[in-house]
Amino acid sequence: MPQRRKIAAGNWKMHGLGASLDEARALCAAFPKPGVDILLCPPATLLSRMRDALDGGAIALGGQDCHASESGAHTGDVSALMLADAGASHVILGHSERRADHGETSAQVAAKAQAARAAGLVAVICVGETLQEHDAGRTLDVVTAQLAHSLPAGANATNTIIAYEPVWAIGTGRTPTPEQISEVHTVLRARLPDPGIRLLYGGSVNAANAASIFAISDVDGALVGGASLKAQDFGAIVRALEDS
Ligand code: 13P
């Protein structure tokens, strides 16, 4: 079986104006031929401008959400087809912030993933337990249920990436122990429909802890929030992944 290629994905969330494109350009210049896949997911307003900034480089571009329909009367929403048209090759789906802020269910995430596939996008599907669920010892139940219901039929290594992001580790500076990450990844991997699907960890990954997280077996890379906003910080994470 071919090795799973590692991937460092940056989720800019609701951060970034035109001036922030300099960070993308700097990252692009620092990694002309990266040893891992690199993905940047800026807000939708920056997609086409970032596509131009990254033009010809090795960094892929992704959206942060899409609607399940191709087009229609859905004010404020963006379709997968629109993301692809703006230059995206990937889209993050089911991020805990979307599940919490917009009440997204796993069934809706699966429908969005279908739409992403139809538009030729790779879906980066997120799962993760809240602190309350973690403290109640329900982590494995929660993430396996989310995975089962968020994955559309036909998900495979070509069209799907999974990110395990414990909600309590996002933006908090707290990370699970290597043993906890390893346990969740092992359980998730056993439930993937295709062993080639890449499994990322996300939640407070930074330049200082990246190497120890990438040393965990079954971690194929990271989905990075805050530390992806600066080329220097994200570049250090990319290098740690290259060296892992
Ligand atoms: P932080 O890296 O800022 O904790 O965010 C993680 C995340 O939610 C990425 O999608």
Image (cartoon, helix red, strand yellow):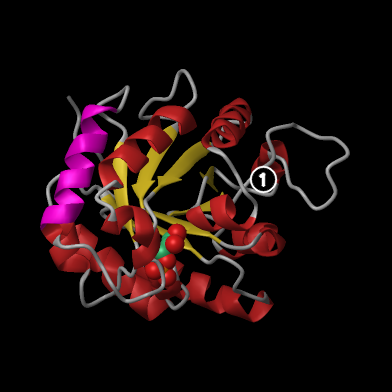
Quadrant (top left, top right, bottom left, bottom right) of the N terminus = top left
Amino acid type of the residue that numbered disc 1 sits on in the rendered structure: Leu
Quadrant of residue 240 within the rendered picture: bottom left
On the image, the x and y values in percent for residue 108 come to 60, 34
Considering depth in this image, is 124 or 137 the residue closer to the camera?
Answer: 137
Q: Quadrant of ligand 1?
A: bottom left
On the image, the x and y values in percent for residue 205 come to 30, 68
Quadrant (top left, top right, bottom left, bottom right) of the C terminus = bottom left
Considering depth in this image, is 125 or 121 the residue closer to the camera?
Answer: 125
Q: Provide the residue designation for mark 1.
A: 83
Q: Is residue 57 visible?
A: no
Q: Please tell me whether the stretch drawn in magenta is mainly helix, strand or loop.
A: helix
Considering depth in this image, is 219 or 165 the residue closer to the camera?
Answer: 165
Residue drawn at (55%, 33%) of the image: 113
Look at the picture and state if 121 lies above or below 93.
above
Residue drawn at (70%, 43%) of the image: 85
Quadrant of residue 171 within the rendered picture: bottom left
On the image, the x and y values in percent for residue 129 come to 37, 52
- Taking the image as shown, residue 193 lies to the left or right of residue 102, namely left
Find out whether residue 200 is within the magenta segment: no
Q: Find the magenta span and give its range.
A: 179-191
Asked if the residue at label 1 sits under 8 Å from ligand 1, the reply is no
Dot 1 crowding, Cα within 10 Å, few <14, some 14–19, many 20+: many
Q: Is residue 25 visible?
A: yes
Q: Residue furthest front?
A: 136
Considering depth in this image, is 168 or 182 the residue closer to the camera?
Answer: 168
Q: Residue furthest top?
A: 154
- Taking the image as shown, residue 45 lies to the left or right of residue 40, namely right
- Callout 1: SS: helix
- Taking the image as shown, residue 234 lies to the left or right of residue 73, namely left
Find out whether residue 188 is within the magenta segment: yes
